Structure formats: C-alpha cells, structure tokens
Image (cartoon, grey):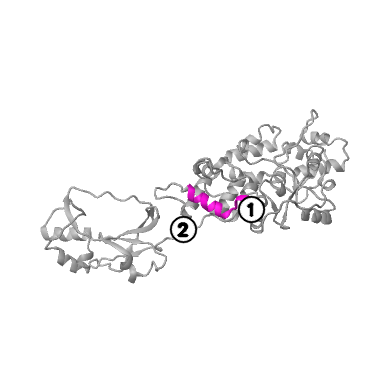
Amino acid sequence: MIYFADPYPEELLFSAWVRSAEHLRYPNKHMYFAEVRGQSRGMPKPLIDFPCHLRHFVAMLPRPSSYTADTLIQYHTLYPYYRPFLSIDRAQLLYEKMCGEDGKRIYWCTRLMNTSIPRKGWFRYCPGCVEEDRSMYGECYWHRLHQIHGVLVCPKHHLMLVSCTPEEQHLADQAFMPANRLLFPKSTEWVLLPPEMEMAERIATQIAFLLEHPQLKLDTDLGHRYRLLLERGHFLTSSETIWISKVIEAFQSMFSQSLLQALQCEFDPQTPTYMTWLGRLLKHRTMCQHPLLHVLTIMLLQGSIDKFFRPLEPTPQPFGSGPWPCLNPTCPYYHELSITVCQVYHEGKARRCTGHFMCSCGFKYVRIFRDDIDQGDVSRLNEHTNIDYRDDYTDYVRNKRGNSSGWQVRTGTMTKMRLWGPLMRKLGCPICTMQLVRITRNRRRPPLPVTYSY
C-alpha cells in the first residue's frame, strides 16, 4: 500500500504526489515516485500534464478508496483540455497510456510534437489563490488551470499569474519541493493593458470551462461544425471556399497583436494566409492543432466554449417558414400559400441571398432578401420580386397555335407579337416590365444547382 494525501480542488496530481512525499519525509522523493510507478529501478520523473501508471497507483491505495483512475485523470490532469480536440482514437489511446504502464510516446498521441506553442512552461501561480488556499487548507498547491499555456490571468481573482523564478522552478520540477514551501507574495512585473487584460481573462474562463466539464462532446465532426459557423459568419465565398483573409482580419480585430505575441499565436506577415495556423486549422489539419488555437477560433466563430458544444440551433430561414404565396393572377391559388419549396442561393462575391419559388401551375419568381422589409408581407412581394413568365407565355402560345409538347423557351427578344398584349392583360403586368421570350425547339435551359430546400 502507498500513502496518498487527498488532492485539493483543481490540484494537479503531480502536486498531490509531491505533498504526499513531503508528509512522509522521504529523503529522496524519487523513491516515492518509484513506488507510484511500481518500478524500483532508476529515478523516474513523473509527467506533470499526463501522468502514467494510474491503474497501478490506484490499486496500491489503502482500501476502501474513493479514487479511480478515471477520477484522477478527469479532475487532476490536463487530459480534459486536450480530449475534445483529438480524434476518438487518439483520445482513447492517450487515456489508455495514462492508465497503463507504458508511458512511452505519450505526447505522440496528441500529435503536437511540432507545434510552435510550448507544451510546458515554468510553474505559475495566482497570489490571490495562494492566500486563499493557505487560509482554507493551511497550505497552497499547484493549480492545474494555472499551468496551461494560454492562461495569463486568474479568472477567479482577476490577477495576473506569476511565474516561478529559475531557482523556484528547479526546486519544484527537479527537487520536488511542494508549492507551500516555495510560494511567497511578489509583485507582477509585466501587466497587460485593461482591454487586453479583459480578453486574457475571457480566454482563461473558456479554458477553465473545459477543465470543469470533462465530459464535453460535440454532436458532429469538428471540421463540419467550423464549416457551419464560417457559413453563418459569411466567411465563405460564392464557390463555397473559405475566405481565409477575411477570417484573419476578423481574428486580428478581436485579439490584439501584443496579446497574440504573449500567447505565441501571432501571424507571420511573410507567411501566406492559407499557410498560417488559422488557415491550416480551418482547411486542412483540424485535428492536429494545439487546444489553445481551437479555443481562440471558437471564441471568434461562436463566442464561447459552452455554446460551441451545445447542439447547433437551426439557421433562421431568410424568407420565413413555408408555405409561400403564388403571384400568378391566372392561377386559382393566386395569393394563397400554395408553394412548399424554396430554393435559397448565395450569389456573387457579396453573397446576396435570393429565394427561388415555383408554384404547381408552373409560375416562377425570385425574391431578394432584404433586412428592411417583412418577408411575410404578401402585399409588398411584387416590389422586390423578379417574375418569370416564360411558362405562362409558352402555355398561352401553345393553346393559340396548337403546338405539341416539346417546345421550350429561353431568353430572347420579341418586339412584335400579336399574342403579347392579351397575355399581358391576362397576367396583369405592364408590357414594359415583361421579359421578352421566344420559342425554341428541342432546347433546354440548364437548371440552377440546388443548395438549400425548405
């Protein structure tokens, strides 16, 4: 059996092990970690973010014990910070390596070996948390949130985190001295400006949410969710490709350059936009990026981690929910809600939204979406509607001339046609606004591709 001091809330498992060895007064704390791993040889150094051999450690605890390997992983390691942004296979492999006795290549599971963001820095702490822990528990400890790269501010006390000095780092990381013997109040040398401080605190709050909710799960693929959010944010071109320069512009307007430099997430001006970390994350390598990069991207596209992992709300239909009215004066369903299908398109570089409607009588019209009008107001539909009378004209001509089926129509010119006037009066449309057509044989107009259907 092995002695284990109960970990405090949000305490790193490494910190609890160091405190346990300190309580036992081990002359060499490496001996305690050898017992944790079940290996008597060598001088093993435990991993701070992804500790291993947890099944063996739990089995060595005195009975009865309320601790399981899953409890320690979910609430006292950094695994919940990485898991939502790993593939299912990678996340499961990382979990098994932490539970098992084979901790080799454990960082390979995260696929972050070549990232520019450091995996681990010096120990950091919040002066407010140190005082609060000593008043509540009689000693302070290493908080796991404070050790994550990207957390610059304590979201609880709104204070800048303080990094250990080189001497303190050596004592904590190599000699395994507990935090209570190392940490004393000191002033912060580098302070962010108020707007940057507020944004840094927002980032820390989002990362803390990931740690506090280890069971977060996305209802769809991560890349697919980013795609939907890009579409809703109008970051897609008319050819459905990502407008990456516009995304980077919005990103830089949200996060200041000095804050990005502090997070080591800045963009190199010499690098093409599609080769930046944001371009790679959105286009090519969604699952191979540091969690901090995903957090910043989610804050840009969705606003918060909480909203991102909720089921995505359906997009409001630009032309309302069907059915929609027919505008053909000759149709028995005139101004009645008889059209059940609306095909929505985003056309041109401006991504102008248009809706294409077709009644069962063959009448077609196109509406352009505008925010300043009520899309359900039938009385104003003609003001913002392009009407296609080709099918009505074709039927009218066939009835007059007795033409057989197979005649099609396309855009053209017709300046003199005896049949034009009666048709205009029948449809209630001035001749000057009518699109002129002519009859063609065995010619078909290629249909537009369907993007959305309601």
Q: CA distance from mark 1 to mark 2?
A: 27 Å
Residue 260, image x, y percentages? 61, 49
**Is residue 248 magenta-colored?**
yes
Magenta stretch in the rendered image: 244-258
Of residue 361 and residue 261, the one placed in the foreground of this image is 261
Q: Is residue 140 magenta?
A: no
Q: Nearer the viewer, residue 115 or 362?
A: 115
- Is residue 357 shown above or below 261? below
Can you give x and y, in whole percent of width and height, for residue 210 in the image? 64, 50
User: Residue 108, relative to residue 143: is it above or below?
Assistant: above
- Residue 106 position in % (x across, y down): 66, 35
Query: To which residue does mark 2 refer?
Result: 315
Q: Position of residue 101 (x, y in %)?
A: 71, 33
The quadrant in which the C terminus is found is bottom left
Count every numbered label the image shows and give the total: 2
* Residue identifier under label 1: 203
Nearer the camera: disc 1 or disc 2? 1
Residue visible at 23% across and 65% down in the picture = 433
Judged from this view, the residue extending furthest toward the bottom is 379
Q: Amino acid at mark 1?
A: Ile
Crowding around mark 2 (Cα neighbors within 10 Å: few <14, some 14 to 19, many 20+) is: few
Q: Secondary structure at mark 1?
A: helix
